[in-house]
Amino acid sequence: MSIINDRRIKEECGIVGVIACEEKPIAQEIYYGIFALQHRGQESAGIAVSYDGNKVAYYKNMGLVNEVFNEQTLQLLPDSKTGIGHVRYSTTGSSNVTNAQPIVFYGHYDRMAIAHNGNIANAGAIRRMLISKGHIFQTSIDSELIASMININLNGASPVEEGVYKACCQLRGAYSLVLIANKQLIAVRDKHGFRPLILGKKDGKYIVASESCALDAIDADIVRDIEPGEILVINDDLTMHSIFLPEAEKRLCIFEYVYIARSDSIIDGRGVYDARYECGKALAREIKIDADIVAGVPDSATVCAKGYSDFSGIPMVDALSRNRYIGRTFIQPSQSMREVSVKVKLNAFRTNIEGKKLILVDDSIVRGTTSRKVVDLLKRNGAKEVHMVVGSPPIKYPCFYGVDMQTREQFISYNRTNEEIRAEIRADSLYYTSIENLKKACCSKNQKNGFCTACLTGEYPEPVENEFGKLLFE
Amino acid sequence: MSIINDRRIKEECGIVGVIACEEKPIAQEIYYGIFALQHRGQESAGIAVSYDGNKVAYYKNMGLVNEVFNEQTLQLLPDSKTGIGHVRYSTTGSSNVTNAQPIVFYGHYDRMAIAHNGNIANAGAIRRMLISKGHIFQTSIDSELIASMININLNGASPVEEGVYKACCQLRGAYSLVLIANKQLIAVRDKHGFRPLILGKKDGKYIVASESCALDAIDADIVRDIEPGEILVINDDLTMHSIFLPEAEKRLCIFEYVYIARSDSIIDGRGVYDARYECGKALAREIKIDADIVAGVPDSATVCAKGYSDFSGIPMVDALSRNRYIGRTFIQPSQSMREVSVKVKLNAFRTNIEGKKLILVDDSIVRGTTSRKVVDLLKRNGAKEVHMVVGSPPIKYPCFYGVDMQTREQFISYNRTNEEIRAEIRADSLYYTSIENLKKACCSKNQKNGFCTACLTGEYPEPVENEFGKLLFE
Amino acid sequence: MSIINDRRIKEECGIVGVIACEEKPIAQEIYYGIFALQHRGQESAGIAVSYDGNKVAYYKNMGLVNEVFNEQTLQLLPDSKTGIGHVRYSTTGSSNVTNAQPIVFYGHYDRMAIAHNGNIANAGAIRRMLISKGHIFQTSIDSELIASMININLNGASPVEEGVYKACCQLRGAYSLVLIANKQLIAVRDKHGFRPLILGKKDGKYIVASESCALDAIDADIVRDIEPGEILVINDDLTMHSIFLPEAEKRLCIFEYVYIARSDSIIDGRGVYDARYECGKALAREIKIDADIVAGVPDSATVCAKGYSDFSGIPMVDALSRNRYIGRTFIQPSQSMREVSVKVKLNAFRTNIEGKKLILVDDSIVRGTTSRKVVDLLKRNGAKEVHMVVGSPPIKYPCFYGVDMQTREQFISYNRTNEEIRAEIRADSLYYTSIENLKKACCSKNQKNGFCTACLTGEYPEPVENEFGKLLFE
Amino acid sequence: MSIINDRRIKEECGIVGVIACEEKPIAQEIYYGIFALQHRGQESAGIAVSYDGNKVAYYKNMGLVNEVFNEQTLQLLPDSKTGIGHVRYSTTGSSNVTNAQPIVFYGHYDRMAIAHNGNIANAGAIRRMLISKGHIFQTSIDSELIASMININLNGASPVEEGVYKACCQLRGAYSLVLIANKQLIAVRDKHGFRPLILGKKDGKYIVASESCALDAIDADIVRDIEPGEILVINDDLTMHSIFLPEAEKRLCIFEYVYIARSDSIIDGRGVYDARYECGKALAREIKIDADIVAGVPDSATVCAKGYSDFSGIPMVDALSRNRYIGRTFIQPSQSMREVSVKVKLNAFRTNIEGKKLILVDDSIVRGTTSRKVVDLLKRNGAKEVHMVVGSPPIKYPCFYGVDMQTREQFISYNRTNEEIRAEIRADSLYYTSIENLKKACCSKNQKNGFCTACLTGEYPEPVENEFGKLLFE
């Protein structure tokens, strides 16, 4: 998924948790951690830290991390032993600060706070069940529901993990969680491990984060991935223990490798960069195209393109330039200027492509509208042929596990043949990666986990209720 | 309570509810309604309106009504049949937008919204009970608790008022409520009727508001006061019915007449202006002072002063000028300028008071620090004598019913004789209104209600738990 | 001019200047000073202070003084020996921060800053002249023009007052100025003295302000009024000297007494409160009305009403209540609610006026639209008769000296007889103060100054060029 | 200049001008134009458009283009025939909205507006001269000075270009200008052509912009570069003519190619991408290093690295990942976290570099502090050797022509040998591009222009006055 359609597919969130053996300015480290995860969500950002035992100070607001936090707002957060942070994806309309995370709440352990990445597949049923028991909800986000479920399953005397365990047994779908309660940091990854979660360490602190790049940003060392189904409890003397949910098939979202994660992250033992590069090589191995040059759609498809180029021997060039200030908010041009929009984001290097047969590598195609514009842009700048090579298979089914994909009708691959898609985007040819090759590319050496490929195959790891669609897209 | 100490005593809130027989821009009317109730709370303001059946749109923020709402934010609220509004008092420190009202929540009737004026005396016990049952709270305000209690006592099929009735039977303390749910507007006044609540009517609409001045502001006619213990349900065809809580002693907060309410409001049949005026006359009847002139501390004590002047025949003058831009936020002067602060707010008319024996009427004295400054200001501007006459009895006990009075130790009347207080504020003499005279002044012709005078007598209408203090002042 | 039409007539500005014998936090004192002058302008506020010799730090923005300045923004201003402050009136449309004052500029004495109250009558001619010489202007306000004129008339070696003197000889119209340059504070009042300006003193500091209420607010003592035509130069050792412009007729704007100034100010030796009170008495002396009660339109006309009541013996009552949160910004109601607007601002005390013949005192009538609404409001609340008594003569001519009065066509007095006006506002009778009586009321004991009554008589103290209107109202 | 030190060297500004044959929403196109030039300045943004003849509407504020402009602020700007836009670089401290551009002013042609990229070398002398003639300045930026100079040299009857011509004859230094006045758009490039300026065309409009990428963004076609010394006047019937300043040596700033301009721009006929690529090839031709891989510091040095790789045959890898949300505002870590900062911005791909001898290409080195951190980062991630190759010669002299370079003492190249620099940044070897090779790489085929290389050689194209340094860095 490249910049040109990064408003189409969105990962839900990024999370960070920190626990220190003494009170430290951990809000700073959480700040750098969520800043490193900014690519996972640009709508809102928030940090919550404990103080004075079970009190919690927090600040959250709409905006990018460095818009929400400045010296003034960061100083609102006292030195602390435990804290969590969150970035949330951007949508239009229903986005407001009420839905920002972390969710801070009063429960059995006085003040608690939770941050969540993922999507609860049976959220509707659980909400109805809880409301029927008299509970109220003040937001439309799953995280408030998880907080309620944990608290319901706690009672004053029992350890936090007991409530978490019981709650998780009732939750379906994708959730990586960090929770602060009872002076502990609890990290949870759902039994399928849909979303990544990793543990790091730095002088007198443990850090949990969605991706390893957040650990790097604060100079922490990787300890290990949180296992699917693991509930990890870390105490403020830095001792820790884990309990595990009933075992289940491992199903890491394969699109974490395709475009969600940052290329410098390592997820479940596999480097994202390497996965993309291998995918490009696999494509070159299978697909022989008579072309002069290879180029990737910046930024996310350049690694895949490089793999293709290196294996095929067809030289790689920079075909497209990307405006690096494209961000969260951008005024949509009026009707008369609509056609301009691709060039605001992407421009072509004419001298590199003029008269050339070009292989254009993109990581995925969702709606196809921008693919068509890019092909057109390249041809108007002199490319003789444009062959589109896609680093993932066609997307055909909606995601219920945390990626904001459109309804089926919006996918260009829905009810269209390969040839029809090619014609639609006006490429000279079109090739997708096979599911097998993609899986192979994403496998680590000692691969323990399988992948969730439901959006490609329609085979959901868990039964999907009717309501899901409604809830997901309401 | 005059301007000079209006940061000392604060009423909790003002509320407005509107229901119309068809979709109309009622957010506008709620806006004018809460603007008219601005004196009841300057911290935050909010409006929630229903749309599309049981959806709710809302906007709330920190600030005065005309800071929070402008054309842009008001337009966020669609035409609607039901809506409520709220203004909240200003404190320092813990004030944040999370605590702003209305509270909008998902419950048995999908989206519901509630606004609350008052203070739940057994909030602590109820919170603990609900948390022990697994409920969570996201704010520290009573209104969230009331929302939970109502929803717990509802079930899908039962009418909203049933849940409200059952919830109210468990709540102690002061609460006037407006609630939108199930396309109805529900207005509730606790069984003692601590806080006012009045019903008005205007072409195709019913309006409920804390004070009649809000009805005037939107040109609605007064229908009647909501009765203590009444749960009034208005449907969107403008039919209505009431159910009643178990009967109890009527205990309207007498300080509503003394300084909380706007002087042009009529509460439980008694005009606030008239009550203050009568109080001034009663003071003049009892207290004979050898003086040349009478003056009131602007703005709230001028009516009482006029009553005193008219009865005693001692002419009334303007002794003090008030800066009418004094508002919610004002930079406190640094140490070196601290003594200046009274003159920033109040100035003296030297030509009116020079060489005169002056009776200064204030409506109440809480801490006494500013009374002392005002006496000093008048003397420095030539007043020969300053006799302080107070339109209420000494305040000696904390309030648990919605007025943010300080702990007992902060009252100047705590453990001090009248003479000690007089010496402290450096007046030449000091007189308070008796409780009997104040009650008489505040009685309407067909008085049905008694008054809560707990802050004067320590006789609380309901047993006070130990925890109250902690909860109230946490 | 009462609250109900305070968007109709606007004074241009209020100014404050401070000079201290050593570096002190004078920005604080300027803050309190302009806060006390807030009634003279609610559009923008600003403070500039010198530091490091001839550098100047400043902060200005749109909004009320306590919106523009908070602890953070006030701390941007270092301790200083000289500083000035300004508040500016509110208009719609063309108001923006570029036009906020003080104007800070680089000139002969490096950084200088100026603040201005008034209106330069020949601004158009001077602007054209300066532009033709190649000067540019970045704002549409006179103050930038005055700054240019002063700098043009300086040269590096000459004292600041020389440049000021020469500039003033070319300026026509109304201007009270404070200027910081060359470590001096210079205060200037135009030769007619249209606008007030007063000198005060406080431990180690001199303060210059538009009105004495600003001196009171910072606990400074009044020294004396700045004379019409005086250029007062104060050095940072607190020595001072004055030079004078060519003598001219004294013409203080009489509307300063009628409604512009705060009632606790003393201008040119005459208390504003006293002038208004005397005006009320004079009205009672001349105009005998068969009525039961007298009332003033709050806030500004209550003093005049009291004078009327005290002289006539007809008792004064509170007929109208004013919402004291009416401020700078207020959403105009949509068409359907337009008629509501008066009651949002003013409400009637029915019990005080029901069945009564009422004399309603207002300080002035400009357009008359709100007078009509108030009369209507009183009658709907039971007043049997409403006799309007106005504390000033009919306004018939535009002002070119700093009051933002409408064009002639907008005055209700324009081309209408007294009877026509009465019918228009639907009062039972209508009386104006005579010019003679108003002048007498505004005279101090040792009256040296005459008054500008051009808006009443059309006799402008200086010839009025055609362009004026265009410039004033552009 | 790569991301890691992009707070060290800053280009002054980017400008856009548009003229249309009829009133159109050109503010939108200016918006996209300056958005494409965002890399030239991130401090403030502004747009001014003419309307109603010679009136000008404008909006400018601190922040990135998409922070300053949203639908609301963009709608403040009416349809228009002429308009200009500006982005300004970011500094700390003295940055405030007063210094934002365009400068809008009243002059001979009523309202005019100007936007400027560059630095006037004799600004101090001109300011003193103008102030001595009585002119005042309200900002500390050159553009106000240019506006004054143009207006001084105009008189009502003469064409705008006459004033511009005369003004330019007195200005020294670097200036590319766009000006709207008298319904014309005037574009000016100083006689040396220090800064780029290019003319484009699109249906019924001409566009002038700092770089061709801005033309691309609005789908305009390149017409030609504005010539050094050219004053181009375009009328609103789209006729145009040029006059020329006295001829001088062409001296385009060579750092426009090195790192200032966007790689997809074409300046004076030479593609920036191509120049960087050729530079990399030239480096490879001269410098033979025994290494396994080549990598560039993202983003700006990757093109140069690719040139090196392609010529040398040493394979290029991605060694560093850049956080693409690094922007204008970023909280500096506290002392204890200072060492973290590079990894917040850049991370290493260990698998790509482990055990490898690495050639790291950067485009320039200014202070060297971050170069050292990057070398360290790479070595800690397993690089066996790091050979630094720099795409430009050592910077040794300050720039007086619009690039905010530090004083000489801050350059790592100042008074240090190559070996000393290498040791300082802890690289295994260090190579710079020679001036000759850099010039060759930046030459277009029909090269007419020379280059300004003053920062490399100290040979300034114009005599440098003592005051320059003071003015530049004040």
Image: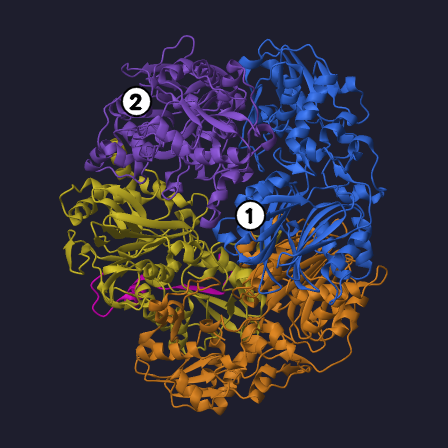
Chain colours: A blue, B orange, C yellow, D purple
Is residue C279 or residue B278 the one in the foreground?
B278
Name, please, the residue furthest toward the left: C157
Q: Position of residue B272 (x, y in %)?
A: 57, 75
Is residue A200 or residue B29 the one in the foreground?
A200
Q: Which residue is mark 1?
A: A31
> Mark 1: which amino acid?
Tyr
Q: Specify the subunit that label 2 lies on.
A: D
> Do circles 2 and 1 both sit on a common chain?
no
**Residue shown at the point (30%, 59%) measured from the top left:** C26
Q: Is residue A192 above or below residue D450?
A: below
Q: Which residue is mark 2?
A: D457
Which SS class for mark 2?
Answer: helix
Residue span colored magenta: C424-449
Q: Quadrant of the C terminus of chain B?
A: bottom right
> Is residue A428 rendered to the left or right of residue A23?
right
Which picture quadrant has residue B122? Answer: bottom right
Which SS class for mark 1?
Answer: helix
Q: Residues within 10 Å of mark 1 (few under 14, many from 20)?
A: many
> Mark 2: which amino acid?
Thr
Q: Specify the subunit that label 1 lies on.
A: A
Q: Is residue C308 above or below residue D61?
A: below
Q: Is residue C351 above or below residue B161?
A: below
Q: How many numbered tags mark residues here?
A: 2
Q: Is residue D72 above or below residue A298?
A: below
Q: Position of residue A48 (x, y in %)?
A: 60, 55
> Is residue D203 rendered to the left or right of residue D208?
right
Q: Residues within 10 Å of mark 2 (few under 14, many from 20)?
A: some
Residue A228 lies in the magenta stretch: no
Q: Would you say residue A232 is visible in this rendering?
A: yes
Is residue C347 or residue A36 the one in the foreground?
A36
Q: Position of residue C460 (x, y in %)?
A: 27, 50
